[in-house]
Amino acid sequence: MINKSTNLDNQKQLFGHPIGLYVLFFTELWERFSYYGMRAILVLYITSTTIGENPGLGWSAGEALALYGWYTMLVYVASIPGGIIADRITGQRKAVMIGGLLLVAGHGVLAIEAMWAFYSGLGLIIAGVGLLKPNISTMVGGLYKPGDERRDKGFTIFYIGINIGAFLSALIVGYVGEKIGWHYGFGIAGIGMLIGQLVYAWGQKYLQGVGEFLGKADNPENEAYNKPLTGIEKDRMLVMFLSFFLIIVFWGAFEQAGGLLNIYAKEKTDLVFMGFSVPASWFQSVNAFFIITLGTSVAAFWYKWKLGGREGSSLFKMAIGVIIMGWGFLFMRFASLEFEATGSSAMYWLVLAYLFHTIGELCASPVALSFITKLAPIKYASIMMGAYFAATGIGNKVAGLIGEYATAGAGDTATFTGIAIFCTVVGIIVIAMLKPLKRLTHGAEDLSLDPKEAEGFELAD
């Protein structure tokens, strides 16, 4: 039997955190490099004409956004079977390894110029992300003992790794895809995933005892699997499912970035800056840039906010994040009004929108990941993380539907204004319901160890 407690106590530390965190950091960095690189050029490739030096598929914007919505939804919904496979068959560590191999294959196939390769590559990526994404996030939580105050900080470090990969991918894959060839861009994304897989294989020695398969339910050494959920666990499951609604709203708005806003940048924005034509896909790196540069500042704000005795629960942060992110669309409303008046809009509107989207994301997303690991019963850890990503996937599909609706005649101004108002209203409703929702957590966020154990690295609370 694996003595997890002993393994956690004996972990080597770096900058106040287990070395395993940095193995997962770089693995996810390169996985996100591959995913966001492909995401940055996917809709642009699909909508590009079938003739010219860099031909695409020649689909309409509505058709492209429909496929984008289905694809991004399935990528995250696949996290549910991915979590089940990890919990019941392989364990999280092996599931991440298998998922990484599928992703390498998927991105490699996308580099082939054929329709069978296009659909097959997307299918392999869906399966690969489904196995990797929920389980690598759960492993981050598994590096820390219950009540360890470094857990949220660890997730913020991990989240910054995600966005370093996203930032580099939009610049590199986006430029190569738009300026040299779409399939060369897909190929570079595959190389990034291969690097991530090699990092993960090398770092296995630092992940011993984390993400292991606990065994079948009839194994007496895994008594937690045999017990029914307690009343407290049922309440916590309920509040997690309620929080998924917030997640759907958040990503339904936020993921306009890869679809509607991506097309808006290419077709309706003045992209000339000091004589240089900025690739539209480069705007996909703006969000990641702001996360890298503002991540510690936002985390420090919340840390000081909570120390001052003010409300600092995960649900509160998530609600505030939804509101702030929604306000970013007010800048897109101004951009669309400028386009209607002059025939183009300035780039700074997109930059300001992504700034607010990023601040909202920093308030909501890393906290949501940590929230799930705090509340989920042990035997459902990966499944609930899979459910979280499935909610993200549903949000992505909602984003695609909103994009289709906008291009079908609703118009940009009405769409952007509606998103801003809806997000604000939802956030306010959640804040108003905060007390009863917090009671359902039964103090899961109040557990803590000696604060001295968290000294030396205050990145997020």
Image (tube, grey):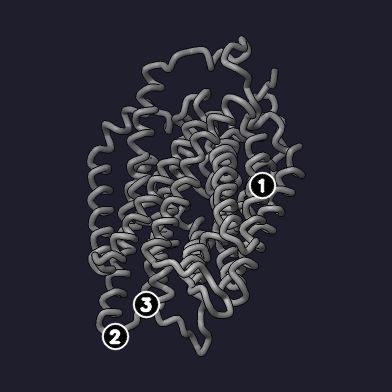
The answer to whether one can see residue 307 in this image is no
Q: Which mark is residue 160?
A: none
Q: Are marks 3 and 1 in contact (CB under 8 Å)?
A: no
Horizontal and vertical percent position of residue 13: 69, 41
Q: CA distance from mark 2 to mark 1?
A: 49 Å
Residue behind mark 3: 268
- For badge 3, the amino acid type reads Lys
Residue displayed at 44% across by 53% down: 362
Side of 107 relative to 337 (left or right) = right
Where is residue 346? Give x, y as percent.
37, 80
Q: Say what amino acid the circle numbered 2 marks.
A: Thr
Instruction: Report which residue position mark 1 lands on.
Output: 22
Q: Quadrant of residue 230?
A: top left
| Mark with earlier residue (2, 1) | 1
Q: Is residue 382 above or below residue 321?
A: above
Relative to 425, is 407 above or below?
below
Q: CA distance from mark 3 to mark 2?
A: 10 Å
Identify which amino acid the numbered label 1 is placed on.
Answer: Tyr
Residue labelled with disc 2 = 342
